[in-house]
Image (tube, helix red, strand yellow):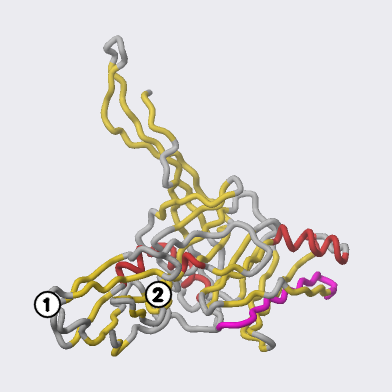
Amino acid sequence: MIIRSYPENFASALEPVVYTMDAVRLDAWLGANLDIMQHGQSTPVGTKRFYKGSKLSINIAPYALACLNILPYKSGNQLIQATGRTAKMYLTTDGELSEVRHIAAGRMTLPVGVLLSDRALRCIAPGEFDEFSFIAPEGDVWAEFSVSDAKGLRYSWRMPPFVSDGGMVVCPVDMRVIARMVADEVGLAVGDINKVKVVIYFGSDAAFEVNYVVEAATAQGVRLAWISRYGTVECYTFPICTERKLATKRLGETQSGDGVTFPLVEAWQEQTISSGLLPSTTVQCLSDIVVAPKVWQWKDGSWGECNIMDSSVVTHNVDEPSVVRLTVRDSKNVKTKTL
């Protein structure tokens, strides 16, 4: 098997991901099987059968997409190899193996060595968990954290070293872990922290940094996570809930054992949330929620799937600070009952 062209590394599984190659076993009138494999698995995720021909081409995008499993993290104190956010794929036939390619769920081919997000400046509250993702080159990866208070006092540390295999990496930012660390090491209360900075190093070279402003949580805040255009997970707390309601839908009728007819009602919770005034770059990032394939809401210490009821986000005064408003519905009905 001679591969004439490979797909790009970290190509999008939402677009054709095509290999071209010379035909296999041209002298075999029975044809030959070409197995599509996921790295680390012994069973093919798909098989194509080819007969005589000078050139072959195969699109593995549907097979790679089926191997992806993007879920938000909820805790962590070290860098994480995000195995479910890219699929390591290769082809094999007659004992010959192609090179491995990472295939991702972004809407474009992902760049290596940069922050996979449109927000390098973020907000976080005491007790909240956040994450950001990047593709690291092979080798040592470090995450250096520093926190500061209003007086300018600063404390820094590094996460344990991480050896990248060249795939996607997630850096957790867990304010619960940070609070315990700074309290034990320097006696700094979590309420006194006003900034957190994370610098990512590849070997000894600083690659990029992510900055957090620590703000007090609001009692009505709603924290959402969603799959971004990079195929990563973004998190944001909408601080304002303008409306909550229990919506219902009549499904039909049912009868009790004594023949009395009752309406059958399905019910679910909806809430309308607002971001408050934000710069245009952040508004654009949050607006992406309405086209995200999955959205989750943080509730009772875990992420649960939810649905965004809006089909669009309208931004007024595009060049000025603006507001994102969304209506969120629980993905599972609160109850289905006979009244």
104, above or below 192, in the image? below
Residue 229 percent across, percent down from the top left: 43, 72
Residue 164 percent across, percent down from the top left: 58, 77
Q: CA distance from mark 2 to mark 1?
A: 33 Å
Q: Quadrant of residue 194?
A: bottom right
Name the residue carrying label 2.
Answer: 103
Q: Examine the structure image and report whether residue 190 is included in the region drawn in magenta.
A: no
Badge 1 crowding class, 10 Å Cα cut-off, few under 14, some 14 to 19, many 20 or more, is few
Span of residues in magenta? 138-153
Badge 2 crowding class, 10 Å Cα cut-off, few under 14, some 14 to 19, many 20 or more, is many
Name the residue carrying label 1.
Answer: 29
| Residue type at tag 2 | Ile
| Residue type at tag 1 | Trp
Q: Residue at x 33, y 85 (%)?
A: 6
Q: Are marks 2 and 1 in contact (CB under 8 Å)?
A: no
Residue 47 percent across, percent down from the top left: 26, 68
Looking at the rendered image, the disc whose residue lies closer to the viewer, 2 or 1, is: 1
Farthest residue, direction top: 258
Secondary structure beneath disc 1?
loop
User: Of 152 and 110, which appears nearest the observer?
Assistant: 110
Q: Quadrant of residue 192?
A: bottom right
Q: Residue at x 65, y 66 (%)?
A: 173
Q: Is residue 131 left or right of residue 52?
A: right
Secondary structure beneath disc 2?
strand
Q: Earlier in the sequence, mark 2 or mark 1?
A: 1
